[in-house]
Amino acid sequence: MTAAATVQKSTTFAAILPLAIFSAFLASYWFAFGNPWNMHPCDAHQPHWQTVVSEKRAELAAKIPQEWLLSQRVIGHARSRRSIAGDSLDSLLDSHTIDITTREPTEIVREIASGNLSSVDVVTAFCKRASYIHQISPAFLEIGFDLALSRAKELDEYFITHGQTVGPLHGLPITLKDHFHIKGLETSFGYVGWIGTFEGIKGTDKEKNVDSELIRQLVSVGAVPIAKTTLMVSTWAPENNNNILGYSWNPYNQELSTGGSSGGEALVQALRGSAVGFGSDSGGSVSMPSSYNGIYSIKSSPGRLSFKDAAGSGLGNLAITAVVGIMGPSISTLHLVFKSLMETRPWEHDSSVLLIPWRSDQEVSPDDILNFGFMEHDGIVAPHPPIARALEIASNAVKNKGHQLIAWNPPSHAANAMHLSHLFPDGILKKPISLPEYENITLEMIGFRNRYREYWASTSRTTKNGRPVDAVILSVSPYAGFKPGKFDYSAYTSIVNILGYSSAVVQVTFGDKNVDVVQDDYKPLGERDKLNMDTYDADASDGVPAAIQILGRDLEEEKTLSIAQIVTDAIKDYQAKQA
């Protein structure tokens, strides 16, 4: 029986667990003591907050149509499996639903625009698939299938009347991390205390009556929100856990974490519960779960995508701002969605968005010869064997296409201490700091950014064509996957947020316990690296996605996405030749 199934059976809980930000403690507690949420709404002996949770979970269940409900036998069997990815979920669905939901989103919008698919058909198929996912592995803090189908009907009527779509995402079902307000749905952000409120306050007249700016933009180009996904309570953590739905499990191995804090969205995208998803990232919260769950993503630079009118914590932090990330089954999907959002001219509605439209001239041609930086490790923590092999595959793939790779030795990632150790010394949340101390930390980050920028420019002296590196290939994190409470190192992604750069996650391969072993001659880079490698479990990582990161400079999303596509194609070609 998997850990996911085990926690469903336990009802023990020691009083009310404080909503800590540091996820290792939360995840370890959950894993040790089980799931407290299997309770009846009418249990008079449970604390009030648990009653609120029970009622919320019942409300979500009631939003699933009767004909889509799975039997307890089916649910139990799915939760007891090691993996629910791929054929496991498809075996429960009808062929029509599978046909639609496994298509590339770029194909779906083309088929809708040509009249070969209706928005209602597409939205219905994804809602059905999403409902199965939620029953097997709870993923949605809000379900809006009824609202989505109503909108799909409107879109079909518009298409019939006008003979054209409302925009490039016409009829495309989407899901979003529960950061974003959608009219008709609550936003709990994982807080029990926010249920039935607007961001924790009752009687505001804003309850279920606000759209975040990102929602307005997406709807204006035809996208159809169908649900909002679970997240790490208060975000700022590499795992996914809250007191409403509990811990989120990796669909490729239900003993492992989805990662966080956008782990719910990563889970849904891994199982194709919507065509494309949206998360938030302030330290790797989009990139890391994307890598663990076998999907692609783009983390934008600050100033490209709107966070206006979104709920959250730390939204006033301008030193390291939370940014929107797009998650989906392919780079071409991310390209389509990012470009579509730029067509809405977001800078006219959000003062934090820069006046930078989509720049096709910034995209790199597949025929261009590129310069890549290549980081085998950051000198502090080396990646586990599956990730090391993914990096090797990517390196060989791009070299086989004639691109140049140079060793990437930037200013030390020890600067990651600026991001987390100041906040969590010894793993404990630090008390608020003074403004002078905050200013000093910010100045340190500014200095680090300038040194990194200067290093990047200096690579022009190393490359054959005299141009600086176009992008960097590096790990997303040291892990292909990790067990609850075992995450220890985020510098490969949090450094990207310190810099404010763009980055894309590219899937490469899967863990193989017969190949991905720690070599006998392994010598740790230091004590932290030794501790990291000691956590490696070849059996647990077997069959789990192993991804890489493509790092681009700030405000270069067009270039980063096009390079990510070039790398993806090179990897596929290389693997085909090796087969």
Image: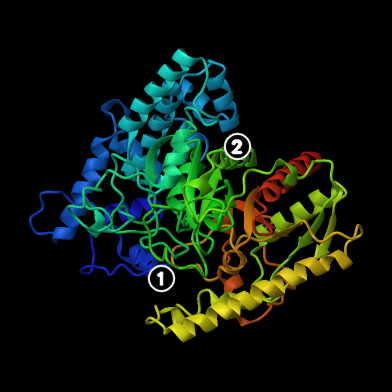
Between 139 and 553, the residue placed more toward the observer is: 553
* Residue 348 image position (x, y, % from top left): 50, 46
At label 1, the amino acid type is: Phe
Q: Residue furthest left?
A: 44
Placement of the C terminus among the 4 image quadrants: top right
SS assignment at label 2: helix
Q: Nearer the viewer, residue 420 or 25?
A: 420
Left or right: 197 in relation to 451 = left
Which image quadrant for residue 300? bottom right
Q: Is residue 413 left or right of residue 537?
A: right
Task: Give percent across and percent down for residue 479.
Answer: 58, 62
Instruction: Please tell me which of labels 2 and 1 falls first in the chain.
Output: 1
- Mark 2 vs mark 1: give the one in front: 2
**Numbered mark located on residue 336 in the image:** 2
What colouring style does the render use?
Answer: rainbow
Q: Which label sits on residue 22?
A: 1
Q: CA distance from mark 2 to mark 1?
A: 35 Å
**Is 306 left or right of 72, judged from the image as shown?**
right
Q: Nearer the viewer, residue 383 or 450?
A: 450
Residue 473's place in the image compared with 275, above or below, is below
Q: Residue furthest front?
A: 348
